[in-house]
Image (cartoon, coloured by chain):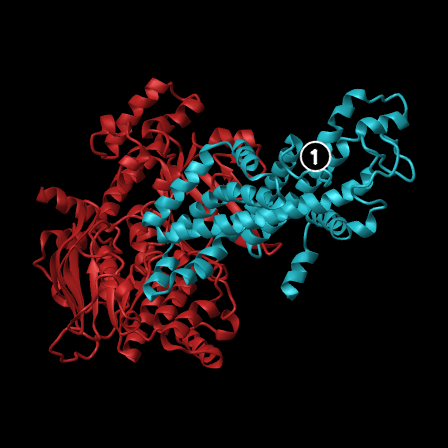
Amino acid sequence: MTDATDLLLDIRHLTIEGKSGGQWHPIVKGVDLTLRRGEILGLIGESGAGKSTLGLAAMGYTKSGCRIAGGRIRFDGQDLVGASARTLRGLRGKRIAYVAQSAAAAFNPAYRLIRQYCEAPVRHGVMSRAEAERDAVQLYREMQLPSPDEIGFRYPHQVSGGQLQRAMTAMAMACRPDLIIFDEPTTALDVTTQIEVLAAIRKVVREHHTAAIYITHDLAVVAQMADRIKVLLKGDEVEEAETRRMLSDPREDYTKSLWAVRDFRRSPPQPVPEAAPMLELAGIDASYGAAKVLDGINLSVNRGETVAVVGESGSGKSTAARVIMGLLQPDRGEVRLDGIALPATSRRRPKDLQRRVQMIHQMADTALNPKHRIREVLGRPLEFFLGLRRDARERRIRELLSMIELDPDRFIDRLPAELSGGQKQRVCIARALAAEPEFIICDEVTSALDQIVAEGILRLLDRLQREMGLTYLFITHDLATVRSIADTVVVMQKGRIVEQGPKDAMFQPPHHPYTELLLSSVPEMDPDWLDRVLEERRAAC
Amino acid sequence: MSLVLTRFREAPLSAWIGIALVLLIGLAAIFAPLLAPFPETEVVGPQYSPWAAPYYLGTDALGRDVLSRMIYGARNTVGIALLTTVLAFLLGAAFGLLAATLGGWVDTVASRVVDVLMAVPSLIFALLVLTITGTSVVALILVIAVLDSTRVYRLSRAVAQGILTMDYVEVARMRGEGLFWIIRREVLPNAAAPLIAEFGLRFCFVFLFISALSFLGLGLQPPIADWGSMVRESAKLISFADFSTWQTATFGLAPLLPAGAIAILTVAVNLIVDWVLHLASGLEE
């Protein structure tokens, strides 16, 4: 099947090393990769697996601080390892293009989209400026962007995230490259937006018979996009197979464990008969300046249960958390804890009230002060809320670290920069626990993590809830998370609650139309899922 | 403590050069009375003697020993510049961090005051104020410190605003931490790197500013020796220099000595700052 002329990319025994602590460590350890024209290869693995490094290497590029230590990369018969900068420049953008994870960060905010589109084709002498602009409009139309004639004349900040990602793909297509590398192009998007972007990318790539390497940690996404899937673990290939076979019959244990992640279901807690809810939001309206972001929110949380708040970005779910924490003063309504109204701002709340309600942020990176060692991160709330000092404090810090499954001796003196993403999030959880709270708001705590790590965090939260009788408000846009951890689900859209009820009822029809849209947009581990959903939606129109 | 030592041991050559030079100048300043062969202000020989024993760097227009005046000049210029910079930093950083953290009217008032101060070119502003207050050392230090604190204010406010948007500050606020704790524990450690860099630069600017004022006659007053006024006193000699023999050439080099000292100290301080910045930014790697 693979004849010589058909072979586009051929990587053999590729080893890439990165420098840390003055020494070279292997990031990619002798991986082989082949790609035929028009074929889409999915690269999956958890963070640190080397999938992005391998993807970039396909362009003959390594990040600074990395080097290609061995092996060869042949693109269409041309050797990229050791090729001159001039040769590589001629290929990049023209015959090999790259689509980054965050389009918002990859576009230059100072130029209009179409000007950035034209840069590569004009620079490579493929088209004149005027031709390139006409071509851009054509591709924008193919990418199903709204008003393709004028969208190119907007600046990046005037376009939504999903549209920007599609504009980025159009830009990558500008020179009609033979190969496009997609590096987690939909990871930063909501499910409802993701589905549009996936459909558009797949359509364009197939119609132009472009080969692609699709890097992601989301298995369900890769199932829709790829012809073949390669699984990586710590720089090594685990296995590779055709998509359908890989999904139905994974060989290696590691792959099976990846597949099983989404099956985590926590055992429902014993219902605690209680007359009054623990936390209540009564008729909350809130706004940022003139923009109203919460509109008549009524919500109650019972002791010991997990309430999941779902909705796409901009639906007001994080704002609701800020109101509960007293960081944003509501225009109307009140927050009650055990039936007693809380003062509207955190500054006016007594220390003990602040202790009882804690919050865990989405980005553990920014939630930990980079200059504070873990001892201080955990020690401060212990000292502040509970008045623990010296030995008592030290003992408790160690207990907390054991609780979050980190070895106290190894971790207590570390700085956040010396932790992985999942470990950082665990430390944030420990910090919240240090206050001995009753109620914890988890704001998208797993969305910045890959699935295996995220599952570990969910299991930890579940265990802590059972052991300590905690109550969670779980803010998320990931319905798989909801399915695994929630008792009650609240669906929000544009600052309003559109539907709420017990989890099982929420996942059964009939749904509110918005809930239906959310549910149907969650990718499934079925290669035909995207086609089916698109078909259904087309039929419904 | 051992960590500090390791850091010193691993310091690059450029940092060592900077440290050595600053130490040299610092020692000269501290032990000036012991090191200088002649007193600071006394006329000890003929005017404009060439570079030869016992006047190794010659004498100036009044017959004072240039080497002695260079050594005392280090004490006066560097000491005052250091004091002024520290004062400017205490003032500027304190107000800058407070304004950023409190926001609201505190920020508005402080920022407008700083705008007014910055609107007038600082040299002209300093000249104006110093003609009113007179050119005492205390007045000099206070005026320059206030003027320079405006730059420090701007920087520390901008840096702090960036840090204050981070979630960890929000966590501290939710915990109910006080203003002082947030500034000291959450903001300051993260603002340290740019502030240290600014300190090095600011020190050099203050130093040059005092020299400039001295050059204009409004800085340190004669007969006190400082490098800036020494450049001024000997500047005109350049045009009389005769480079045909070594003895006469030294005459023309006279203004380059204090000017060179200023340049060397400036470079040395920045070499150290670069290294400290590197340490502060990159953790282990």
Q: What count of labels does the image hold?
A: 1
* Residue A453 image-quadrant placement: bottom left
* Residue B57 image-quadrant placement: top right
Task: Name the side, left or right, on which B201 lies relative to A100.
Answer: right
Foreground pick, B75 / B161: B75
Which residue is outermost to the right?
Answer: B53
Observer able to see residue A1: no
Q: Amino acid at mark 1?
A: Ser
Q: Which residue is mark 1?
A: B229
Locate the C terminus of chain B by quadrant: bottom right
Tell which subunit mark 1 falls on.
B
Foreground pick, A461 / A415: A415
Give the image location of residue A302, x and y in percent: 17, 73
* Residue A138 image-quadrant placement: top left
Give the image location of residue B264, x and y in percent: 71, 40
Foreground pick, B279 / A419: B279
Chain A colour?
A: red
Mark 1, secondary structure of its residue: helix
Observer able to see residue B193: yes
Give the image location of residue A450, x and y in percent: 37, 58
Q: Residues within 10 Å of mark 1 (few under 14, many from 20)?
A: many
Residue at 82% across / 47% down in the picture?
Answer: B36
Residue at 21% across / 62% down in the picture?
Answer: A344
| Relative height, residue A105 to residue B95 (above, below) | above
Residue at 11% across / 78% down in the picture?
Answer: A275
Letter of the chain in cyan: B
